[in-house]
Amino acid sequence: MRAAVLKEDYRIVLEDVQEPSPGPGEVKIQVRVTGICGSEVHAFKGTHPYRKPPVILGHELAGDIVEVGRDVEGLKVGDRVIVEPQIGCGRCYMCLRGLNNLCENKIVLGTQEWPGSFGEYIVAPAKVVYPLPDSLSYEEGVMVEPLAVGVHAVRWSEMGLGDNVLVLGAGTIGLVTIMAARQAGARRIFATDLLDYNLAKAKELGATHIINVAKEDPVAVVLEETGGKGADAAFITAAVSPVVEQALKAVRKRGKALLIGFFEGPANNLEIFPLTAKEIDLRGCLMYTAEGFQSTLDMVAEGRLDAKPLITEVLDITQAQEGLEVMDKRTRDAIKILLKF
């Protein structure tokens, strides 16, 4: 089968690799469309902790079941499906509490343990395969995965109806968080970025205030607009120390700051005094649970979340190198680049 393989840092090669076969409890899926995520960009640059070359990347996908292994129920050849790209063991402390995203033995799609959707076919346990409603395109199906990240973040923030939220970074994850916060009933949504294109998209998707951090101080804007109180919750999707500090300074006393973004290195010289002085709750946020993934799929199918505005362009799988370079270097305006077979 064809696969776009990360052979070394900054080099993707399209080559023929062995086609996988499903085992008991598994299905084989022909990938129709897959997405380029920020984690793939980190792997491309050599900064991801466990996505190391040589590897077939890709964990956002939609496709068709072409083969079914033994002991699979509820799925059949020809079904259009999407995949929750994490396998929990089902036995550890976290899995037994419904937190498969924190499984102690988790396997993630797009790694050497589980080759990803930049390949023409993947195999997946039936338990993480979800039928794609007929009303949704393959492209919309791919977007369920990143949308689930935003939905999980907003739920974990425990924000309430009428709350003020700050989203630091208006890339894909920042934008899906804005969409989820709007759906959850946020009153004001402040969005920051350096790129006017991303900020315009943030406004389109529900941000009430957009802040170009090259021109304005986001902390000052948030405090002014909230009468000095601060945001109820801040979502950190751009993982650099100054942005974390902005979150801690901009949230209210006993507010919450959630770190969603992926730090490529240590947080250097981080000023954390506000964490103590305001009794701020600083939380990590990782992917989503199986229940959250299903809920997000339902929200997209019901029209409560519209994934289409996030999709900038769809390239052929032969252009995987180009797509990753665009997302890394921002050589042209892009939010979400998809690849098709």
Image: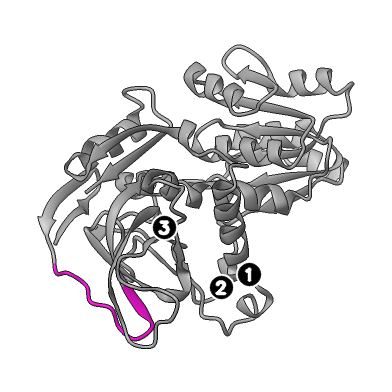
What residue lies at 16% left-to-right and 43% top-to-bottom? 318
255 or 172: which is nearer to us? 172
Residue bounds of the magenta highlight: 18-27
Residue at the front extreme? 134
Residue at the top extreme? 215
Asked if residue 42 lies in the magenta stretch, the reply is no
Distance from label 1 to label 2 (Cα)? 7 Å
Answer whether residue 91 is visible to the viewer in this image: yes
Distance from label 2 to label 3 (Cα)? 17 Å
- The residue carrying pointer 2 sits among few (fewer than 14), some (14 to 19) or many (20 or more) residues within 10 Å by Cα, namely many
Residue indicated by mark 1: 99
What residue lies at 46% left-to-right and 46% top-to-bottom? 143
**Of marks 1 and 2, the one in the foreground:** 1
9 or 178: which is nearer to us? 178
Amino acid at dot 2: Cys
Q: Which type of secondary structure does the marked residue at label 2 adopt?
A: loop
Q: Which type of secondary structure does the marked residue at label 1 adopt?
A: loop
- Whether label 1 touches label 2, CB < 8 Å: yes
Asked if residue 19 lies in the magenta stretch, the reply is yes
Amino acid at dot 3: Pro
> Residue 49 bears which disc, if any?
3
**Where's residue 225, x and y in %?**
82, 19
Q: Is residue 152 above or below residue 312?
A: below
**Of marks 1 and 3, the one in the foreground:** 1
Residue 254 appears left or right of 43: right
Quarter where residue 273 is shown? top right
Amino acid at dot 1: Leu
Residue indicated by mark 2: 103
**Where's residue 168, x and y in %?**
62, 32
